[in-house]
Amino acid sequence: MKVQYLFEVLGTAFFAISGALAANRKSTPDWFGVTFIGFITAIGGGSLRDVLLGCYPIVWVKDVYFIYAILGGTVLASVFYTTLQKLRKTLFLFDTLGIALFTIVGTEKALSLGAGPETAAIMGMFSAVMGGVIRDILTHEIPIIFHKEIYATACLAGALLYLTLHYFHVSRNLNFWLSGSVIVTIRIMAVRYNLSLPKFRKESVTSTI
């Protein structure tokens, strides 16, 4: 099994778990509601990536195993819900693993479709964060990219590392693991030490007559 395919399936399952946990924490939805949020969380970013790159059919449409991964992740979230909720920052854990896997997969796929390195890095970020953005909107949360902790920037850093190692012909499998690990490390450090990028400040304009 190719490491890219394994990463994408695992990332899909992790995002489905993240979405299911988030949905259940907001209310008491039925199985359909939770599965729907898990599905959107898992395939939102990848679907947007494929549409922008003109890659059809979209990955989960042509490969039923991605749907199985979503269903499996949702079931795992239900079966181990109490245990997962007791673990500290469980939602953060699965979300972090998801963005790491999807960033590298999205970057790799964009390159394989002929995109330049700049576009590939952006597509990798889109693959990783947009599913979570849609999840947060549907569950009435402020999208995580607007939080102060480093999030999308960690994805860009991992994508840039992947592109750099790819340029120097580093082993593809090793590149995947190293780049994904960088994203996870940056996210953990950002949350642990409350790291953030400089704020964007817009000076208020005082009109005078």
Image (cartoon, grey):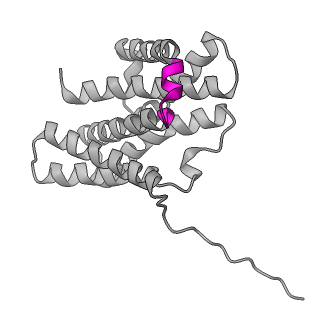
Q: Nearer the viewer, residue 126 or 25?
A: 25
Q: Is residue 104 left or right of residue 138?
A: left
Q: Nearer the viewer, residue 27 or 45?
A: 27
**Residue 87 colored in magenta in the image:** yes
Place residue 153 in its image quadrant.
bottom left
The magenta segment is 81-91
* 64 lies above or below 105: above
Residue 145 image point, x, y percent = 54, 49
Q: Is residue 40 visible?
A: no
Residue 92 image point, x, y percent = 48, 38
Q: Residue at x 44, y 52 (%)?
A: 192
Q: Nearer the viewer, residue 186 or 107?
A: 186
Residue 52 image point, x, y percent = 44, 39
Q: Residue at x 43, y 36 (%)?
A: 93
Overall secondary structure of the magenta stretch?
helix
* 35 lies above or below 180: above
**Residue 89 colored in magenta in the image:** yes
Residue 197 image point, x, y percent = 48, 64
Q: Residue at x 33, y 35 (%)?
A: 101
Q: Residue at x 38, y 17 (%)?
A: 66
Q: Is residue 126 left or right of residue 157?
A: right
